[in-house]
Amino acid sequence: MLELYGTKGCPYTRELRESLDLDGEAYVEYDVEDDEDALRRMIALTGGRTVPVLVSDGKVLMIGVQGRGCIVAAPESAGGPEA
């Protein structure tokens, strides 16, 4: 089954989701803004934070849509400057 990593607010995630739905593709979707584990898996797969990402059997099929994507913030627990 396909895995779609994206965010609710990214128009390219929405575009890819709609395309998969129209094609009748079965997929599971992960919102990497709400699911830190999914974000970590996506970063491990791609080395980056651009969504949408489409994965099949652990292999990245697509990052972005036609060269367009959204960048997600690093996980809060990843460290960084203290507030």
Image (spheres, rainbow, N blue to C red):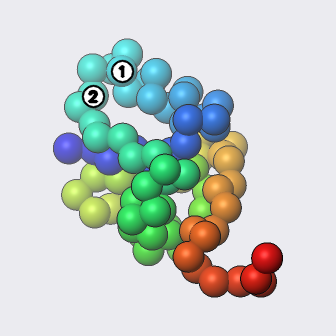
Give the class, few, some or many, for how many residues have Cα within 10 Å of label 1's Cα (few <14, many ≥20): few
In the displayed structure image, the side of residue 66 where residue 45 appears, left or right: left
Q: Which residue lies furthest to the front in this view?
A: 83
Q: Is mark 2 on a helix, strand or loop?
A: loop
Q: Which numbered marker is on residue 8?
A: none
**Mark 1, residue position:** 21
Query: Mark 1 belongs to which amino acid?
Result: Asp
In the rendered view of the protein, which quadrant contains the C terminus? Answer: bottom right
In the rendered view of the protein, which quadrant contains the N terminus? Answer: top left
> Percent from the top left, x then y, of residue 64?
59, 47
Can residue 3 be seen here? The reply is: yes
Can residue 53 be seen here? The reply is: no
Q: What element carries label 1?
A: helix
> Percent from the top left, x then y, of residue 28?
29, 40
State the residue at coordinates (45%, 29%).
17
**Mark 2, residue position:** 25
Residue 71 in the image: above or below residue 8? below
State the residue at coordinates (45%, 23%).
19
**Image quadrant where residue 82 sits:** bottom right
